[in-house]
Image (cartoon, rainbow, N blue to C red):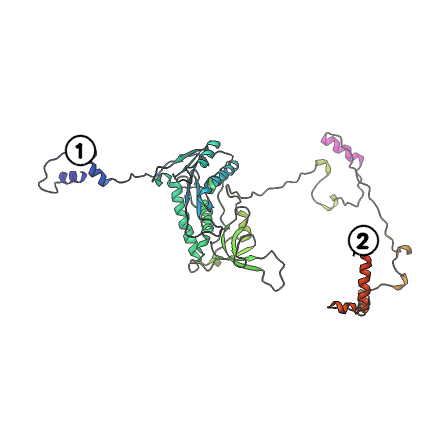
Amino acid sequence: MNTLKKVMKKDLVRGLKDITFEKDKLCSAYCQADKQVANTYPNKTFMSTSRPLELLHMDLFGPTTYTSIGGNNYGFVIVDDFSRYTWVYFLEDKTEVAHIFSKFAKRAQNEFNTSIVKIRSDNGREFDNTNIEEYCDKVRIKHEFSATYTPQQNGVVKRKNRTLITLARSMLDEYGTSEKFWAEAINTACYASNQLYPHRLLDKTPYELLNGKKPNISYFRVFGCKCYIYEKRQHLDKFQRHCDIGFLLGYSSKSKAYRVFNNATGMVEETYDVEFDESNGSQGAHVDVMDIDEEPLVEAMKNMPIGDIKPKEDEDEVQTIDQPSSFMGPQDGSEQDKILPNEDVHVPQEQIDEQAQDVGTPVQAPQVAPQRRSQLTSVHPKELIIGSPTRGVTTRSHNTAAFVQAYSFVSSIEPSTIDQALSDPDWVNAMHEELNNFTRNEVWTL
């Protein structure tokens, strides 16, 4: 109708009579049915939440083609609407969603010291079930659903799913890492996006919106790069190699450590003693890592936050030492002011009286523990001397010679059979002596 109106108004064709077009109602049922399209969804240009955990977006993706090394096939993604901070959990089956969410909600509300107001998800049976509803009713959380077949209404977490999967696919391809590590790649992608991707409206990273300070990412390393893992589990020989070779899988959420895969043991480990070689990836031909003035790894790891719900960096605690009172004397560190523990302390009464007047309170002279004095003598009593005093000092060489001389007369050859033992009188006497000891000590009854 709009096209015909435009054609007639501009006189683009001949033979068209003057017709008035007014779209005050829908066209016939057949016209509307043939041209029906979905409604548009405008972008959101304002903030609808004012604090973390006021609204959480949730979604589940999977099952994946490859089972992860932990035996999981699904990914459970939770996004905070205010900060856009993301948490991801991996499940073996979608029925575990209710249990995982209840654990997450308890820890999040405890660590943030606030309550969850609303959650939003699609109409999947993993979310729309009695377990979720009973828990939400118990803790007074409002559960909102998107309309059926309308993922745009839950677009925040849907778009985050796509971002995480795209990042993980690129990270696995960088060093040719196996697809069975897809869960580690998604977890690392989520970890990095929380500290790198700024909020579209607030122009701050999710980490800063959550913790109030800018993240320090100097400890970041390329996913899948080769690494050298220092061995600490066993005693190493002098000429045995001191490290295993593996590759990086991510960052630990419980300690300041890296998650690496050890090729020697075939296991995922969390370790602090590791060095990385990032020169063999696809970016090796474009960037020379030796030219980058980066912070040393040990210093950079001090900035690694800890925590899987609310990660925070460890703030340096300044320990202050209580200064003594003013009447204890100057503390400039000079030699004449230092009191040695072996010296007798004598404080004049006049000094005590003057200091008491300055402080305003009576001061008692310090109590000094009596020193125990011992006298050293160069002549020892004869009854305390072991051995003959006229013999002199016996050196180590003489002791060794005497031991070797006595050891040479002792046989170190043991019989290999019972017949050889019975034919040797010394072994027979030894066996009789052992049996007599059993009888004397009443060890057993033969």
User: x%, y% of residue 387?
Assistant: 88, 60
Q: Are marks 2 and 1 in contact (CB under 8 Å)?
A: no
Instruction: Report the residue marked by disc 2.
Output: 442
The foreground one among 335 and 100 is 100
- Residue plotted at (87% across, 53% down): 377
Task: Using the rendered view, name the quadrant where residue 95 is placed.
Answer: top left
Q: Earlier in the sequence, mark 2 or mark 1?
A: 1
- Locate the C terminus by quadrant: bottom right
How far apart in space, not on screen, are marks 2 and 1 (Cα)? 119 Å
- Residue plotted at (40% across, 47% down): 163
Q: Is residue 63 above or below residue 46?
A: below
The foreground one among 439 and 72 is 439
- The answer to whether residue 360 is magenta is yes
Relative side of 266 to 366, left or right: left
Q: Is residue 160 above or below residue 169?
A: above
The foreground one among 57 and 394 is 57
Task: Using the rendered view, name the quadrant where residue 133 is placed.
Answer: top left
Q: Which residues are magenta?
A: 345-372
User: x%, y% of residue 427?
Assistant: 79, 66
Relative side of 194 to 343, left or right: left
Q: Nearer the viewer, mark 2 or mark 1?
A: 2
User: Which dot marks residue 351?
Assistant: none
Name the residue at the top extreme: 360
Name the residue at the left extreme: 15
User: Which dot marks residue 22?
Assistant: 1
- Residue plotted at (82% across, 58% down): 436
